[in-house]
Image (cartoon, coloured by chain):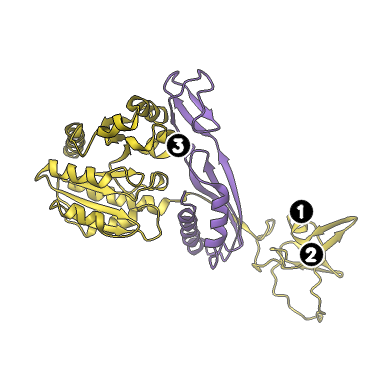
Chain colours: A yellow, B purple
């Protein structure tokens, strides 16, 4: 069926046989046989813009909309130039303003499942001691991770995304409402374990922190470049296992810098504590920078 | 990646625009998708058909325009065009390239009645 006039079939214009749609697109006058008779007073209810020949009668404006602008087709073009994720980005912007007003620093922890995000986070919280902080835990199902975080004494909200493969800014906004956020504190957002989708969704965080464990293979940054490009820093976790897995840690760093030449890299082990002080120094440094910017 | 979520984002924009510009139906929608946006176009086309059901864009024609991927080469300092994210720099052969655009996911325009 033609989407302009609703007629089916084809029309003959001279030697050309065209579909109705083609005839409309080319602006060629052609017949519109409705399959029934019209009396002489019959009102088609059509506006008049472009003439259509039909059995000796000239019809105007036979399109679906029933209205038209002279000299133009009945459809109109609306320039949008809007990002597909503009709604998410607007909410992320609001989250960012709340965090800036508080002088709180938010990190979005992203990785594949099983990289050791939650263990690393528990150890980070333990080492941050009494520093004010709150945690948003994203998983498809269960509150296991939030339970583990709460066991450290920290405030945590679990967000279950159901079938969703990533946290979005609205989920984080609602979780932030449910948390006590302290001025000058940290907000840790542990995203759903997924190295693809969370890269595109701004949550309002100050930095994405990618966690990559040594058991995942040195070429992971090349296989999933988007996430490592979006991250400001990568934590290469479980380095205590590297000798047992024949992992080439330098090659991991080379591959990380191939997809993101400016990425910072810290080698850590949440289990042995290796590199944890460097990671904590990084966090506190970024928080201090943000506080200074707010004061300035 | 998450083409269903992207299609839902498109639907939200269309419904907002339908209220603002008072149109009933979208005939054609044009998207601009950067080469580095991580969007699987076939998956998005499929999700689009499913998600637009019951919206003003049900049955609309979806057109996707490719935008080139550009990256800054950290070896020679030039901004170059890349067909694939992991291609070497076409000028110096360097391998450290930071994307500078090409991650766009934009609704360009739509034809409405």
Q: Position of A149 compared to A3: left or right? A: left
Residue under the point 25% across and 57% down? A144
Q: Which mark is residue A52?
A: 2
Structural distance between the alpha carbons of marks 2 and 3: 57 Å
Residue A145: x, y in percent? Answer: 25, 54
For the residue carrying disc 1, how many other residues have a C-alpha within 10 Å: few (<14), some (14-19), or many (20+)? few
Q: Regarding mark 3 in the picture, which secondary structure is present there?
A: helix
Label 2 or label 3, whichever comes before in sequence order: 2
Asked whether the residues under marks 2 and 3 belong to the same chain, the reply is yes
Regarding residue A113, the answer to whether it shows in the image is yes
Q: Say which residue label 1 marks.
A: A26
Quarter location, residue A63: bottom right
Q: Quadrant of the N terminus of chain A?
A: bottom right
Label 3 or label 1, whichever comes before in sequence order: 1
Residue A272: x, y in percent? Answer: 18, 36
Q: Pointer 2 and pointer 3: residues touching (CB < 8 Å)?
A: no
Q: Position of A60 compared to A53: left or right? A: left
Residue under the point 82% across and 66% down? A31
Residue A94: x, y in percent? Answer: 30, 52
Q: Quadrant of the C terminus of chain A?
A: top left
Residue toward you, A172 or A279: A279
Q: Which mark is residue A280?
A: none
State which mark lies toward you, 2 or 3.
Answer: 3
Regarding residue A176, the answer to whether it shows in the image is no
State which mark lies toward you, 1 or 2.
Answer: 1
Chain hosting mark 2? A
Q: Regarding mark 2 in the picture, which secondary structure is present there?
A: strand
Structural distance between the alpha carbons of marks 1 and 2: 13 Å
Q: Say which residue label 3 marks.
A: A223
Q: Regarding mark 1 in the picture, which secondary structure is present there?
A: loop
């Amino acid at each position: 069926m033609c989407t302009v006039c609703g007629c089916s079939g084809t029309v003959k214009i001279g030697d050309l046989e065209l579909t109705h749609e083609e005839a409309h697109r080319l602006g060629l006058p052609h017949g519109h046989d409705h399959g029934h008779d019209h009396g002489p007073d019959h009102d088609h209810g059509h506006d008049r813009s472009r003439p259509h020949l039909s059995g000796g009668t000239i019809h105007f404006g036979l399109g679906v909309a029933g209205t038209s602008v002279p000299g133009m087709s009945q459809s109109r073009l609306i320039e949008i130039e809007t990002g597909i994720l503009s709604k998410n980005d607007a909410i992320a912007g609001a989250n960012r303003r709340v965090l800036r007003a508080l002088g709180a620093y938010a990190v979005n922890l992203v990785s594949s499942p099983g990289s050791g995000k939650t263990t690393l986070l528990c150890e980070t919280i333990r080492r941050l001691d009494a520093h004010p902080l709150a945690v948003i835990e994203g998983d498809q199902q269960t509150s296991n991770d939030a339970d583990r975080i709460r066991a450290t004494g920290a405030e945590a909200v679990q967000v279950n995304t159901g079938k969703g493969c990533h946290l979005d800014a609205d989920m984080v906004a609602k979780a932030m409402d449910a948390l006590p956020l302290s001025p000058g504190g940290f907000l840790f957002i542990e995203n759903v374990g997924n190295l693809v989708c969370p890269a595109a969704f701004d949550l309002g965080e100050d930095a994405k922190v990618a966690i990559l464990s040594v058991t995942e293979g040195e070429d992971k940054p090349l296989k999933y470049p988007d996430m490592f490009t979006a991250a400001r820093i990568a934590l290469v976790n479980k380095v205590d296992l590297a000798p047992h897995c024949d992992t080439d840690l330098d090659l991991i760093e080379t591959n990380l810098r191939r997809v993101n030449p400016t990425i910072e890299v810290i080698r850590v082990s949440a289990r042995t504590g290796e590199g944890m002080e460097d990671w904590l120094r990084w966090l506190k440094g970024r928080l201090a920078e943000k506080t200074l910017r707010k004061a300035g | 990646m998450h083409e269903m979520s992207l299609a839902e984002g498109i639907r939200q924009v269309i419904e907002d625009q339908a209220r603002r510009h008072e149109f009933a139906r979208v005939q054609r929608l044009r998207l601009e998708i950067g080469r580095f946006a991580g969007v699987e176009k076939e998956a998005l086309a499929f999700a689009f058909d499913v998600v637009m059901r019951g919206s003003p864009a049900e049955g609309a024609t979806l057109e996707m325009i490719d935008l080139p991927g550009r990256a800054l080469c950290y070896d020679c300092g030039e901004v170059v065009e890349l067909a694939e994210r992991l291609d070497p720099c076409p000028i110096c052969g360097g391998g450290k390239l930071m994307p500078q655009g090409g991650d766009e996911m934009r609704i360009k325009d739509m034809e409405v009645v």
